[in-house]
């Protein structure tokens, strides 16, 4: 329909990403072992909900949102699959390092795509890029210390996504800026 107001799917996608990222990185920081909790979150909220948000971003004509949410939703689904089937032949920490490194490269270019967008979104993508590469280094070296550092960094990244999700939702609900997100100085 022409002129139809569409809901903003970004809070859904950001919450799916943020909450799942926080929970996985509580594990990475060394607080809890991996288990069905993070796998369920990875499949349903981090994976499926983000893909739905991406499809809705497509409907709005937002290529960046489509690419980000559909890609990271797929990341969570593949990661859950990898964890469940970790004992299949050919899996190794070194190859997992390459998997994470490639996601880091993708995230670096997505971070460049945030230039001209709000500062919180820029922070999320930059910190996620750092997170992927720290996890790569952890898997290549076997360093538990680097894994713990990555865990704390990932908690911050996920918390930033949760904040942005709630800021967008609350600001829209109130029809005014209640929570700041660091609006861009340049136009889109």
Image (tube, rainbow, N blue to C red):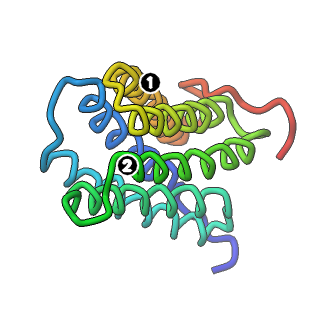
| Vertical comparison of 157 with 70: above or below | above
Q: Which residue is nearer to you in this view: 92 or 43?
A: 92
Give the residue number, with chain letter if any, for mark 2. 16
Residue at 40 percent of width and 47 percent of height:
94
| Horizontal side of residue 76 vs 180, given as left or right | left
Image x and y of residue 170, in percent? 47, 35
SS assignment at label 2:
helix
Residue at 79 percent of width and 39 percent of height:
116
Image x and y of residue 27, in percent? 24, 32
Where the N terminus falls, by quadrant?
bottom right
| Horizontal side of residue 66 vs 43, given as left or right | right
Give the residue number, with chain letter if any, for mark 1. 153
Q: How many marks?
A: 2
Residue 163's tag is: none
In this view, the mark in front (2 or 1)? 1
Asked if the residue under mark 1 is in contact with the one under mark 2, i.e. CB atoms within 8 Å, the reply is no
Residue at 49 percent of width and 50 percent of height:
98
Distance Cα–Cα, label 2 vs label 1:
18 Å
Badge 2: how crowded within 10 Å, few (<14), some, or many (20+)? many
Image x and y of residue 111, in percent? 67, 42
| Horizontal side of residue 116 vs 93, given as left or right | right
Q: Which residue is nearer to you in this view: 6 or 56?
A: 56
SS assignment at label 1:
helix
């Amino acid at each position: 329909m022409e002129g139809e107001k569409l809901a903003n799917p970004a809070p859904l996608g950001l919450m799916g990403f943020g909450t799942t990222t926080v929970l996985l990185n509580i594990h990475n920081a060394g607080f809890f072992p991996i288990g069905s909790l993070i796998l369920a979150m990875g499949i349903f909220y981090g994976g499926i909900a983000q893909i739905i948000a991406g499809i809705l971003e497509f409907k709005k004509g937002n290529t960046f949102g489509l690419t980000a949410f559909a890609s990271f939703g797929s990341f969570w689904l593949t990661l859950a699959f990898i964890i469940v089937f970790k004992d299949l032949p050919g899996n190794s920490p070194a190859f997992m390092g390459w998997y994470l490194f490639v996601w880091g490269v993708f995230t670096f270019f997505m971070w460049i795509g945030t230039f001209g967008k709000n500062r919180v979104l820029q922070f999320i993508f930059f910190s996620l890029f750092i997170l992927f590469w720290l996890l790569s280094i952890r898997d290549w070296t076997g360093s538990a210390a680097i894994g713990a550092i990555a865990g704390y960094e990932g908690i911050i990244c996920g918390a930033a996504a949760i904040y942005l999700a709630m800021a967008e939702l609350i600001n829209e609900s109130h029809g005014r800026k209640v929570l700041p997100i660091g609006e861009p100085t340049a136009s889109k």
